[in-house]
Amino acid sequence: MNFAPLFKPGSMAVAGVSLSNDRHPANVIYNKIHLRYPVKVYPVNPKGGIFKRDRVYRGMEEIPGPIDLAVIAVRADLVPETLGQCIRKGAGGAVIISGGFAESGRRDLQERIAAMAREADFPFIGPNCLGIYAPGKFDTFFLPGERLVRPNPGSVGFVSQSGGVLVDQMVKFTEQGLGLSLAVSIGNKALIREIDLLRYLAEDSATKVIAFYVEGFGRNEGRAFVELAAGLSKPVVVLKAGKTAEGSRAVSSHTAALAGDYKVFADVLAQHGIVEARNEFELTCFCESLSHYPRTIDGKVGVITVSGGHGALATDICADLGLQVPRLSEAVKAEIRAGLSANIRDIASLENPVDLTGSSTDEDFEAAVSALGRASEVDCLLLLLLPYSPGISSDLGARLSYVHQQTGKPLVAYVPHVEKYRILIEGFELNNVPVAASIDGAAFMVEAMRRCRPC
């Protein structure tokens, strides 16, 4: 099947647009596409008529131009006829928003539309889903545009069986400054499934990291998914629901998915170097880290801080994750000391963590990052930056990024995410250095590289 019309449409049709209820999901989708995105869109309703001065077409075959993507938001029992119209029209593909299929006991209806599509080699997403969000291009979500938080274009492709998890994750990605290449809510995945989108995103040049929220797989599907993911050159991150008996029941009632044996699945992911996130917070951290550093490290961390307490907290978190915070050699400590300013040279602690104290300046941080960037004892730097210190300037992020680029060793920073420190944070982000909003978030970013197989 050709997925290009699904994800890069030039024209769309929205089936189900109501002439009397502007809050209908089809209306929300149509209005949003029509007003906000550079895509030609046609409203469809069997009654025809005029909607906001635009002609409403009675069926897909009435539309004069080609249709790349059809969005179907009609009653479940009307979906087969609408899907048939799309196929006869020669549309490129569809997103079926409508619910009322396997998740509510109508497996027969779901199998019917899947069989129709297979016979016609016609791709569709859904049913019972939000569909597709392509940053700056279009989205099929039936959520008002003013309420939707939209991440900027970026390098993470995210596939979610749950529309709600997808939308919530988009909020978290935006807060973290993490951009999306593509986001897809697949719902009941009657036709197009995770493994199909894994293949597509693996070939998508805009995607560097592929992330999944998974509720369940069909028989033998999980193994095929893992085997394919393990052979890719891109990192794959998975958040799995249905880990408990109670969670499995919730999954089944949501999208009629079979959760399967979670422990077996988790073990297989770890064996194949596929990164499993335990929750949404980890998923965000892992995607952020691997979008910058798609590589494997041993997990020997050099910590630099201005606060002994923050250094101690970071060390505990690293130890809990299985990361090492090794002692530094006398030679490395001497190199750091030689580069420090006179006012902190005798008071800074040059063990690991390296505590530069609250009296440090930009130049002190540069000296520490430079020395640890060349030290063989560590393979990643964790920078705990508290911008309250008077000697630190707003240029420090950019300055340390430049030093980091000279050594190439992964650098992860923690800076409180408030508007007051935006310029400092951007100094890192614009130079491809990930910045976490918490100490544990920064440690998880390091952990992602340790778990990821060689890329």
Image (cartoon, rainbow, N blue to C red):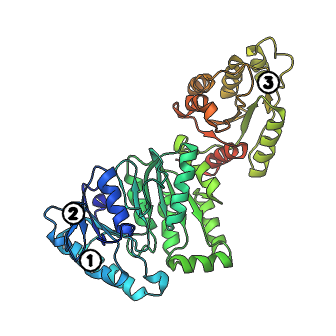
Q: Is residue 383 left or right of residue 150?
A: right
Disc 2 to disc 1, C-alpha distance:
13 Å
Q: Earlier in the sequence, mark 2 or mark 1?
A: 2
Q: Are marks 3 and 1 in contact (CB under 8 Å)?
A: no
Dot 3: element: loop
Question: In the image, what residue occupies the spot 79% across and 37% down?
Answer: 310
The percent coordinates of residue 418 (x first, y second) are 64, 37
Q: Where is 344 relative to 106, above or below?
A: above
Answer few, some or many: residues within 10 Å of disc 3's Cα (few below 14, many 20 plus, some between 14 and 19): some
Q: Amino acid under label 2?
A: Ile
Label 1 sits on residue: 82
Q: Amino acid under label 1?
A: Thr
Label 2 sits on residue: 67
The percent coordinates of residue 268 (x first, y second) are 60, 66
The percent coordinates of residue 272 (x first, y second) are 58, 59
Q: Earlier in the sequence, mark 2 or mark 3?
A: 2
Q: Is residue 259 visible?
A: no
Q: Quadrant of residue 93?
A: bottom left
Question: In the image, what residue occupies the spot 66% across and 44% down?
Answer: 446
The percent coordinates of residue 357 (x first, y second) are 81, 25
Question: In the image, what residue occupies the spot 31% across and 82% down?
Answer: 78
Label 3 sits on residue: 358
Q: Is residue 28 left or right of residue 294?
A: left
Q: Are marks 2 and 3 in contact (CB under 8 Å)?
A: no
Q: Quadrant of residue 32?
A: bottom left
Q: Is residue 38 left or right of residue 97?
A: left
Dot 1: element: helix
In the rendered view of the protein, which quadrant contains the N terminus? bottom left
